[in-house]
């Protein structure tokens, strides 16, 4: 299994530009999570989907952030317009819910390091 | 709501020695799981070990084991025979209705 795939791995952009992060979950997993990690705030859950439906987006910081999951094998996190304070590592994770015996273990992608200048 | 607390921001251990990382949690769920994840400098979040709350037996994965005290809501990670590759940030997490992460413990392994 290829694991969770994220692209790009690194993104450098200028303030005001649109940024799109992509995620392909593990095949067969039906829950997908987007996290943001910074030194100041640690690991924050932004949004999660179950069966392609957004369940909880209370962690999405502002209207500038949006996430979609058009099908079971693809999700995007978009920031428009981007700001320097959005600089962080963004992780995508997937799991099988309800718990399959693995306790809905989350498997993480390698992350996307976003730098907004 | 669930909370996960890691009270040790940093820990260090001599190579080949044993170290224990602490974690406490609070949950109203009756059915939940507990996890330890490792995040090395590569940033990849790697599952280290998983414990099912309804099982009394402590989980073990090679050099990694947990001390699960359900009544005390404590879930510590013991790393035996520490290796240089164990140096990383370690996150404790719980899942029930949702997944909750602690703030992490940075482990340094001294050669």
Image (cartoon, coloured by chain):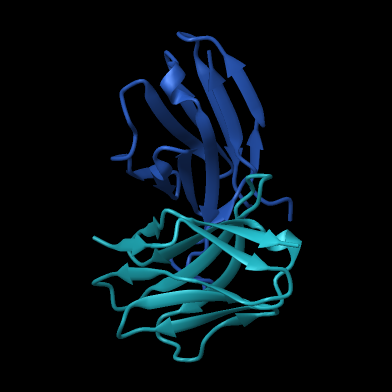
Q: Residue at x 40, y 45 (%)?
A: A45
On the image, which quarter does residue B85 sit in?
A: bottom right
Tell me the quarter of the image containing the N terminus of chain B. Answer: bottom left
Query: For chain B, what colour was chosen?
Result: cyan
Decide if residue A108 is on the left or right side of residue B9: right
Chain letter, colour blue in render:
A
Decide if residue B42 is on the left or right side of residue B47: right
The percent coordinates of residue B111 (x first, y second) are: 76, 62
| Residue B56, above or below A87 | below
Decide if residue B27 is on the left or right side of residue B103: left
The percent coordinates of residue A22 (x first, y second) are: 58, 32
Q: Can residue A97 be seen in this view?
A: no
Q: Which of A50 and A108 is in front in this view?
A: A108
Q: Which residue is drawn at 38% across and 73% down?
A: B32
The percent coordinates of residue B11 (x first, y second) are: 54, 62
The percent coordinates of residue A71 (x first, y second) are: 53, 39
Q: Can residue A114 be seen in this view?
A: yes
On the image, which quarter does residue A74 sit in?
A: top right
């Amino acid at each position: 299994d290829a694991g969770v795939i994220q692209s790009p791995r690194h993104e450098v952009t200028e303030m005001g530009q649109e940024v799109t992060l992509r995620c392909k979950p593990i095949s067969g997993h039906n829950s997908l999570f987007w996290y943001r990690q910074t030194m100041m705030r640690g690991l924050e859950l932004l949004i999660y989907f179950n069966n392609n439906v957004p369940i909880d987006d209370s962690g999405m910081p502002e209207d500038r952030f949006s996430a979609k999951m058009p099908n079971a094998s693809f999700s995007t996190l978009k920031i428009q317009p981007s700001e320097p304070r959005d600089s962080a590592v963004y992780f995508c994770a997937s799991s099988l819910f309800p718990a399959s015996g693995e306790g809905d273990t989350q498997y993480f992608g390698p992350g996307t390091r976003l730098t907004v200048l | 709501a669930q909370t996960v607390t890691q009270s040790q921001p940093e820990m260090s251990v001599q190579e080949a020695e044993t170290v224990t990382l602490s974690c406490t949690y609070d949950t109203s769920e009756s059915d939940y799981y507990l996890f330890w994840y490792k995040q090395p400098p590569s940033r990849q979040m790697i599952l280290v070990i998983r414990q099912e709350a309804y099982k009394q037996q402590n989980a073990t994965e090679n050099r990694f084991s947990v001390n699960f005290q359900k009544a005390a809501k404590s879930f510590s990670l013991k790393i035996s025979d520490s290796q240089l590759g164990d140096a990383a940030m370690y996150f404790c997490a719980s899942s029930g209705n949702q997944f909750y992460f602690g703030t992490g413990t940075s482990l340094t392994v001294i050669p």
